[in-house]
């Protein structure tokens, strides 16, 4: 029987593993590219402000096997905080075992503690397995279109 999965807040000691996971994620998302230095800077900023940002990791037998990040934003539509969910990635050999679901539950609980009434995320429209995963968990598409100006890509 495999060791249990533990979901916890990320630590600075996890940075190398997190950068590796982002490399996996950004290699399949056409809008982004792996860049170790940029990912290190971004993760360090996430870890520096735990009141408004979170990085959750899943680990099995001491090895980081997945991650998700979340940031509190203010939604004028909700009149309340909302959590922007990003960077959900699970190593290939651990997919389909509930790790992603547990990571999303952790970021949702973190958001509830901060008064968030909504979670929102972007998903690559070409990533059918990810879209099916989110749909199974009750996520629904919106009529909005994501636009971007500047940034890596």
Image (cartoon, helix red, strand yellow):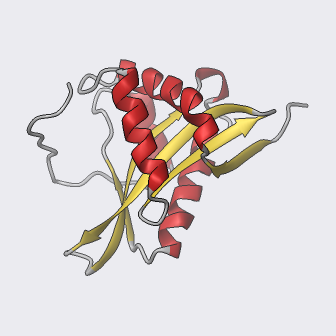
Q: Nearer the viewer, residue 50 or 65?
A: 50
> In which quadrant of the rendered view does residue 117 lie?
bottom left
Q: Nearer the viewer, residue 57 or 92?
A: 57
Instruction: Tell me: residue 109, above or below residue 10.
Output: below
> Which percent across, then down, holds residue 35?
35, 21
Q: Is residue 98 visible?
A: no
Query: Which percent across, then down, holds residue 4?
Result: 82, 41
In the image shown, does 74 or 127 lie closer to the viewer?
A: 74
Please state the horizontal and vertical placement of residue 74, each as a whole percent of the image.
Answer: 27, 71
Q: Is residue 49 left or right of residue 143?
A: right
**Residue 42 image offset from top left, x and y in percent:** 37, 39
Q: Residue at x 55, y 40 (%)?
A: 67
Query: Is 88 on the left-hand or right-hand side of 78?
Result: right
Left or right for 4, reference 103: right
In the image, 105 versus 66, the foreground residue is 66
Instruction: Name the residue: 52% across, 57% down.
Output: 107
Quadrant for residue 44, please give it.
top left
Q: Quadrant of the C terminus?
A: top left
Labels in figure, total: 0
Residue 103 visible in this rendered orientation of the protein: yes
User: Furthest-bottom residue in view?
Assistant: 79
Residue 123's place in the image compared with 19, above or below, is below
């Amino acid at each position: 029987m495999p060791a249990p999965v533990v979901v916890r807040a990320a630590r600075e000691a996890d940075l190398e593993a997190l950068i590796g996971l982002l490399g996996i994620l950004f290699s399949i998302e056409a809008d982004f590219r792996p860049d170790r230095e940029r990912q290190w800077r971004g993760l360090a900023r996430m870890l520096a402000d735990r009141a408004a940002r979170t990085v959750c990791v899943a680990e099995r037998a001491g090895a980081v096997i997945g991650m998700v990040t979340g940031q509190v934003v203010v939604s004028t539509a909700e009149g309340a905080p909302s959590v922007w969910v990003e960077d959900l990635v699970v190593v290939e050999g651990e997919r389909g075992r509930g790790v992603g679901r547990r990571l999303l539950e952790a970021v949702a609980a973190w958001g509830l503690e901060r008064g968030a009434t909504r979670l929102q995320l972007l998903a690559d429209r070409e990533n059918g397995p990810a879209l099916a995963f989110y749909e199974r968990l009750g996520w629904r598409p919106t009529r909005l279109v994501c636009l971007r100006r500047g940034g890596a890509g």
